[in-house]
């Protein structure tokens, strides 16, 4: 089946303006109703199960990560129905998660060395619109890739996903996909974009697989009909973690819908926030498993918690060691996409082959990259970084340059990446390195604080002329955030802001259009309304 109910002919849902636009008091009634339903839930339930698909979205929850279901689903469901004779319809809400860059240590991290990765200000935005109970469909409307598919909720393989031998709960740690479940999902994904060219269909089906696997794992046959509309400012497949960001959005939205996330709110204790982030991260990793097969987990870790991490995977049979870098500076960064397609696997294999042919030399280079990463970590951990920022940036930039040189020596650069570096070096604008697997994809440039404005303008013109794509971003921003309900003060509505218009969101033009409409930065200052889970200062796990 294709377009869902209640949607316009072009595939979007757009309740009439009058119907969707609420006054502040109407909204407050809806929010209060949802919160009342929640406090009932909080008082009456210390456990959670995925049958709890009430339609209220909660901003607080007492569901314990350790709580286990002891009674049967059906008795709990009937209990709940007695407690909540009428549950309010959830307002549309939005979640957003950032992309990432690997700042230091790509490729070396494959060989057990450290990598430093940070969130970027490019983000994905997922609008969740709950439909009334008369609808029984779930729609994925991923505009950037032209995916628009609707499933009948009642036709999905709930029995298999809820079989006692298979059932996973929101607090479970899932580190691999169940082949039987994946197979069942694939059967329901086979119809997605069937008539599109292979390349496009593959992308659509991998996104759909991630969504359905999560929806079936976390939802229930009673799940409300909903539309999940996604826009992203992250270039796809350029090594900036677009897939992880999408998976973090999906995981967060679904966990919110089953009321298993507390917050985010400004007074939330960091330990509690940490539990929520980790819960989101675990399920996002499951989505990444669907898209990538064997992700390291660094992308979803950074996208969930934001800021920056030091990541090391010494022993592949064990979980990685992840250290948060709470003092990671917000750095001015230019991100340039070569638009050169590349395969991570091919680039990783190149380094593997070099290591075989020249083990000592290659290992020395990998060790040196490890030292570069460690030096960068020491630098940003020192109070000197802020006290003498210009000098510290110079050192940090030099480490960028060294890391890039080593990656060139490892054979994973590309003439288009070298062209970017050349243009930037000529203008003395900053320090450049490739980010991610190389062989194409993106380069990052740390801009000199005193870079000549004319030289920057000239560079931008050259990059445009030579068909590079450039983004301005900042390193080390927030992780996943929630806008609930999906109301922003975009317009002149003094009372309570304006509900995000589904059609405007779908049709926002380019990254600027998306940012202006819903962006967590709103194209400048941080925007009121968006809330983020804030991790404890520093931690290692
Ligand atoms: N804006 C988006 N809309 C829908 N799906 C997306 C979007 N961005 C990424 N994806 C999903 O993630 C996949 C790209 O992942 P990948 O090749 O690893 O690139 P990246 O390194 O940017 O994560 C796509 O094939 C698609 O399934
Ligand atoms: C080369 C590598 O270190 C980074 C690859 O990053 P990306 O797929 O280009 O985002 C591989 C890895 O860490 O798994």
Image (cartoon, grey):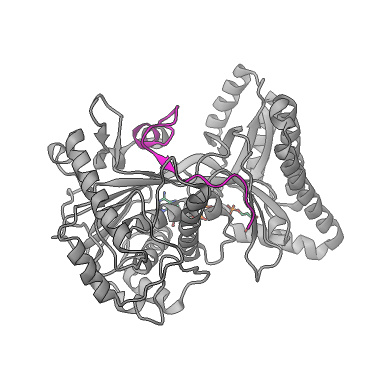
Magenta-tinted stretch: 514-541
For the residue pair 57 and 405, the one nearer the viewer reads as 57
Q: Is residue 450 magenta?
A: no
- Residue 34 percent location from the top left of the image: 24, 50
Closer to the camera, 442 or 314? 314
User: Looking at the rendering, in which quadrant would you find the N terminus?
Assistant: bottom left
Tell which residue pokes out farthest to the bottom in this image: 165
Instruction: Locate residue 511: give its quadrant.
Output: top left
Q: Quadrant of ligand 2?
A: bottom right
Residue drawn 55% across the image and 25% down it: 461
Give above or below for 506 relative to 332. Answer: below
Which secondary structure class fits the magenta region best? loop
Percent coordinates x, y for residue 428 in the rendering: 70, 25
Is residue 508 placed above or below 243 in the rendered structure?
above
Total count of labels:
0
**The quarter of the displayed image where residue 211 is located:** bottom left
In percent of the image, x 38 and y 51: which residue is there? Answer: 145
Q: Is residue 147 left or right of residue 3?
A: right
Answer whether residue 408 is visible to the viewer in this image. no
Q: From the viewer's perspective, tell me whether residue 158 is left or right of residue 425.
A: left
Residue 424 at x, y percent in the picture: 66, 30
Q: Which residue shows up at 24% across the image and 72% down it?
A: 155
**Quadrant location of the C terminus in the rendered image:** bottom right
Lateral position of residue 247 relative to residue 78, left or right: right
Q: Where is residue 123 shown, x and y percent of the image?
A: 45, 43
Q: Inspect this view and state whether residue 172 appears.
A: yes
Residue farthest front in this picture:
43
């Amino acid at each position: 089946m294709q377009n869902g109910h209640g949607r316009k002919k072009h595939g979007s849902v757009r309740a009439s303006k009058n119907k969707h636009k609420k006054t502040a008091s109407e909204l407050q009634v809806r929010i209060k109703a949802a919160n009342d339903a929640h406090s009932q839930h909080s008082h009456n339930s210390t456990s959670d199960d995925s049958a709890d698909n009430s339609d209220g979205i909660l901003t607080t929850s007492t569901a314990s990560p350790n709580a286990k279901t002891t009674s049967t689903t059906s008795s709990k469901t009937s209990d709940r129905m007695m407690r909540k004779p009428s549950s309010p319809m959830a307002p549309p809400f939005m979640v957003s998660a950032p992309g990432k860059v690997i700042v230091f240590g790509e490729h070396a991290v494959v060989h057990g060395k450290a990598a430093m990765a940070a969130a970027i200000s490019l983000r994905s935005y997922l609008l969740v619109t709950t439909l009334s109970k008369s609808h029984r469909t779930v729609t994925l409307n991923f505009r950037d890739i032209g995916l628009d598919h609707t499933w009948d909720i009642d036709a999905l393989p709930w029995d298999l996903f809820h079989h006692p031998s298979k059932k996973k709960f929101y607090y479970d740690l899932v580190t691999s996909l169940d082949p039987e479940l994946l197979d069942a999902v694939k059967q329901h994904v086979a119809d997605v974009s069937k008539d599109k060219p292979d390349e496009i269909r593959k992308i659509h089906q991998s996104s759909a697989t991630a969504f359905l696997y999560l929806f079936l794992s976390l939802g229930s046959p009673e799940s409300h009909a909903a539309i999940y509309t996604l826009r992203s400012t992250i270039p796809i497949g350029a090594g900036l973690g677009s897939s992880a960001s999408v998976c973090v959005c999906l995981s967060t939205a679904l966990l919110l819908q089953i009321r298993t996330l507390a917050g985010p709110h400004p007074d939330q204790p960091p330990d509690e926030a940490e539990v929520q982030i980790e819960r989101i991260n675990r399920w996002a990793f499951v989505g990444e498993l669907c898209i990538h097969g064997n992700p390291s987990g660094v992308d979803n870790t950074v996208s969930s918690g934001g800021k920056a991490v030091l990541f090391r995977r010494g022993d592949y049979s064990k979980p990685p060691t992840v250290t948060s870098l709470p003092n990671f500076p917000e750095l001015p960064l230019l991100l340039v996409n070569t638009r050169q397609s590349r395969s991570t696997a091919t680039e990783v294999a190149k380094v593997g082959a070099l290591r075989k042919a020249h083990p000592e030399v290659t290992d020395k280079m990998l060790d040196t990259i490890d030292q570069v990463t460690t030096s960068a970590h020491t630098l940003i951990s020192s109070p000197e970084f802020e006290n003498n920022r210009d000098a510290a940036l110079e050192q940090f930039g030099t480490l960028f340059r060294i890391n890039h040189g080593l990656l060139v020596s490892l054979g994973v650069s590309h003439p288009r990446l070298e062209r970017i570096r050349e243009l930037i070096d000529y203008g003395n604008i900053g320090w450049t390195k490739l980010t991610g697997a190389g062989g194409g994809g993106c380069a990052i440039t740390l801009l000199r604080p005193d870079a000549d404005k004319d030289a920057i303008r000239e560079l931008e013109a050259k990059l445009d002329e030579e068909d590079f794509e450039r983004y301005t971003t900042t390193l080390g921003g927030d992780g996943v955030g929630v806008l609930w309900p999906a109301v922003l003060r975009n317009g002149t509505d003094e009372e309570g802001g304006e509900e995000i218009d589904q059609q405007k969101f779908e049709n926002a033009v380019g990254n600027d259009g998306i940012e202006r409409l819903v962006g967590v930065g709103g194209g400048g200052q941080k925007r009121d309304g968006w809330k983020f889970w804030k991790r404890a200062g520093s931690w290692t796990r």
